[in-house]
């Protein structure tokens, strides 16, 4: 039977192929899919809380199953899978695939997944590799597919909680996250994407549950705010800041000395406190004494107080203020400004950059000492006297500030035209309007100590009445202008 021999050879070859295939399928290098790691979706999402968390904002992986807000000692994020829509050629070193769709995984001696391959109909779809630190936390997940390469990295604190997380796609940053903890719970999460940076803060109640979650941009503007019904946050009391300041300046060449001392009391709620405590208050006082060649050149006293009711209607704030100034050396008996009501509009809310504009009607009363022979309202006085002015002005003010908690640069421009002129209104704008510009640079040296440098410019035609322009025509006051600079060191405490 010569034809039976080749049939027997074929049956033997088939049996050998089946044996090799069976042995290969049981190869310990390629065990069946493990139940622990799930397959990642590209790009992989940021670490999030346990599914079912009503906030959706808890950023760190949970340490205790079922507790989405406890992150102390958090385990490494579970590696997850990469899927692709088109096939790539299978490298020659990969053994044949025996199923329509198969996942092959490689584990190291510590029991950590180090590689995952996904096949579909014999074609390699995706490859994912994992790296770990000495504590067994995943430090890198690199997913390669036909769509590109996505890399996720993690860093950890000493207690095992996630400190940072990044995602790149083909080398381009897609996501950067940084976490801050308090008592084992995430209190701050900074997220940077190609669209910008946001910071999410979480406040916890007495039972450890999150009660307030707020997201702001780097400029401080509110992007999202959620209050939990589980426990309302206790209102934080607005602190009262009390400060004292002083400064000394000397010049040996002209033998001048300038001494400044003052105080300030402020009560300023944070933006998130406006909902239950919108009242802002400020009070200040300062005294400056200057001499030149032993003669008194300045004896200035200033004081003021103001109140703001923030966000009365949307971004509109109602306010009032009053200020008073006295400088006998400059013949100024008193200069009083009273604004019974005003409105401020926040063009750019408080943050890294702040811009607002305001208007208020102001009553301005001024009394100037006039020596004999001087003029008051075009009249020459025959003896020493006082010249008084009472005007209704409009205060148009624009304020801009740029800075951080450590350094702030602020500029305030104010225009005060007379609203009740005795003659032509247009001429009164030229002859009676006041223009003021104050620029201040403040540097916080410590938490309570601040160094400030200020430049104060005033253009006011009535200033000419405060100077003896016959003997000193070059005096800036004779030109209706005043320029002052000051350096102060302020010490403040919150109560």
Image (spheres, rainbow, N blue to C red):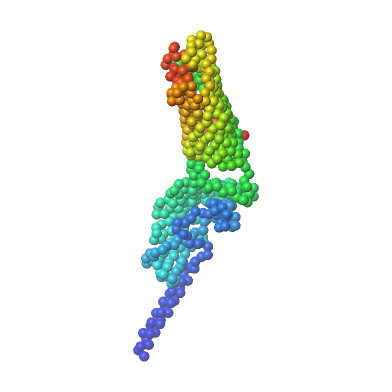
In the rendered image, the residue lying farthest to the top is: 382
Residue sitting at x 50%, y 60%: 112
In the image, what residue occupies the spot 48% across and 43% down? 218
Camera-side residue of 466 and 187: 466
From what the image shows, is residue 230 above or below residue 240? below
Please indicate, yes or no, whether residue 74 appears anywhere in the rendered image. Answer: no
| x then y, percent, for residue 140 | 46, 55
- Quadrant location, the C terminus: top right
Residue 121 lies in quadrant: bottom left
| Residue at left offset 44%, top offset 69% | 101
- Indicate the quadrant where residue 102 lies: bottom left
For the N terminus, the quadrant is: bottom left
24 lies above or below 212: below
- Tell which of 402 and 174 is nearer to you: 402
Q: Position of residue 47 (x, y in %)?
A: 51, 54
72 left or right of 397 in image: right
């Amino acid at each position: 039977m010569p034809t039976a021999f080749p049939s027997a050879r074929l049956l033997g070859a088939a049996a050998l192929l089946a044996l090799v295939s069976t042995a290969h399928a049981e190869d310990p290098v390629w065990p069946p899919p493990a139940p622990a790691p799930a397959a990642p979706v590209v790009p992989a999402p940021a670490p999030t809380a346990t599914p079912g968390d009503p906030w959706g904002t808890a950023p760190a992986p949970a340490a205790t199953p079922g507790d989405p807000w406890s992150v102390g000692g958090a385990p490494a994020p579970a590696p997850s899978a990469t899927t692709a829509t088109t096939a790539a050629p299978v490298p020659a070193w990969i053994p044949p695939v025996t199923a329509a769709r198969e996942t092959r995984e490689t584990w190291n001696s510590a029991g950590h997944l180090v590689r995952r391959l996904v096949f579909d109909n014999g074609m390699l779809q995706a490859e994912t590799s994992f790296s770990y630190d000495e504590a067994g936390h995943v430090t890198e997940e690199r997913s390669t597919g036909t769509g590109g390469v996505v890399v996720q990295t993690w860093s950890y604190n000493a207690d095992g909680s996630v400190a940072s997380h990044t995602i790149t796609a083909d080398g381009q940053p897609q996501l950067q996250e940084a976490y801050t903890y308090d008592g084992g719970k995430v209190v701050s999460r900074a997220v940077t994407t190609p669209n910008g940076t946001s910071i999410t803060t979480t406040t916890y109640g007495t039972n450890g549950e999150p009660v307030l979650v707020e997201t702001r941009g780097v400029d401080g503007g509110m992007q999202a705010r959620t209050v939990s019904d589980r426990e309302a946050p206790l209102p934080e009391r607005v602190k009262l800041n009390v400060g004292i300041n002083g400064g000394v300046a000397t010049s040996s060449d002209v033998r001048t000395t300038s001494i400044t001392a003052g105080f300030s009391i402020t009560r300023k709620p944070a933006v998130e406190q406006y909902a239950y405590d919108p009242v802002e208050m400020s009070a200040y006082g300062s005294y400056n004494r200057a001499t030149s060649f032993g003669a008194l050149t300045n004896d200035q006293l200033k004081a003021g107080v103001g109140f703001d009711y923030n966000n009365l209607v949307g971004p509109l704030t109602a306010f009032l203020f009053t200020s008073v100034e006295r400088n006998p050396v400059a013949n100024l008996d008193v200069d009083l400004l009273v604004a019974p009501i005003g409105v401020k509009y926040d063009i750019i809310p408080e943050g890294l950059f702040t811009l607002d504009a305001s208007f208020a009607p102001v009553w301005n009363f001024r009394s100037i000492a006039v020596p004999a022979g001087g003029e008051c309202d075009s009249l020459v006085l025959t003896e020493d006297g006082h010249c008084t002015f009472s005007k209704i002005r409009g205060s148009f003010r624009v304020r801009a500030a740029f800075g951080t908690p450590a350094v702030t640069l602020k500029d305030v421009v104010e225009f005060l035209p007379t609203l009740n002129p005795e003659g032509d209104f247009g001429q009164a704008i030229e002859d009676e309007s006041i223009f003021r510009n104050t620029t201040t640079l403040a540097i916080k040296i410590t938490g309570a100590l601040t160094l400030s440098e200020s430049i104060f410019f005033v253009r006011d035609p009535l200033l000419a009445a405060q100077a003896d322009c016959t003997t000193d025509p070059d005096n800036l006051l004779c030109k209706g202008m005043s320029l002052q600079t000051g350096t102060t060191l302020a010490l403040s405490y919150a109560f």
